[in-house]
Amino acid sequence: MVERLKPEDRAAGLKNLSEWHLCEGREAISKSFRFHDFCEAFGFMAQVALVAEKMNHHPEWSNVYRSVDITLATHDVDGLSQLDLDLAAQIDRIAERA
């Protein structure tokens, strides 16, 4: 069963993630990504979708042209879990290749 991260574990996990930050008003993390164009942004989203589906942990996201905004939280624990940190790290690896 997935568990909500303790504040110290959340802070330690965020130190290992570049540019992810805590959301104001809720226990979640988010990051914005910019790409060369819409096709590159959509390709990134498709790759993230495959990883998220495999993890059975899905992001909240929006896409406008070449921008993708992603928010991660674990709804089952009403906050952050290790799943969020793991998915964020996977997303960063995908973005590096995009």
Image (tube, rainbow, N blue to C red):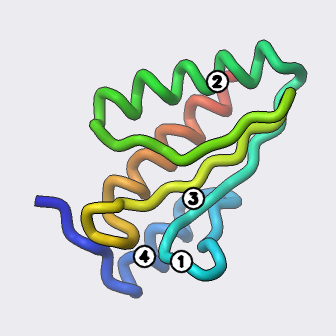
Q: Mark 1 and mark 3: span between their CA atoms?
A: 19 Å
Please state which of the two labelled residues, at mark 4 or mark 2, is closer to the viewer.
Answer: 2
Q: Amino acid at mark 3?
A: Leu
Dot placed on the residue nearer the N-terminal end, 1 or 2 = 1
Left or right of 26 on screen, residue 82:
left
Residue that label 2 marks: 44
The residue drawn where x is 82% and y is 34% is 64
Dot placed on the residue nearer the N-terminal end, 1 or 3 = 3
Dot placed on the residue nearer the N-terminal end, 4 or 2 = 4
Q: Amino acid at mark 1?
A: Arg
Q: Amino acid at mark 2?
A: Phe
The location of residue 53, given as percent across then percent down, is 34, 29
When asked about the image quadrant of residue 67, the answer is top right
Q: Mark 2 and mark 3: span between their CA atoms?
A: 18 Å
Helix, strand or loop under label 1: loop
The location of residue 10, given as percent across then percent down, is 42, 76
Label 4 close to label 1 by CB (< 8 Å): no
Q: Amino acid at mark 4?
A: Arg
Please state which of the two labelled residues, at mark 1 or mark 2, is closer to the viewer.
Answer: 1
Please state which of the two labelled residues, at mark 4 or mark 1, is closer to the viewer.
Answer: 1
When asked about the image quadrant of residue 15, the answer is bottom right
Residue that label 1 marks: 26
- Above or below residue 11? Residue 75 is above
Helix, strand or loop under label 3: loop
Dot placed on the residue nearer the N-terminal end, 2 or 3 = 3
The circle on residue 10 is 4
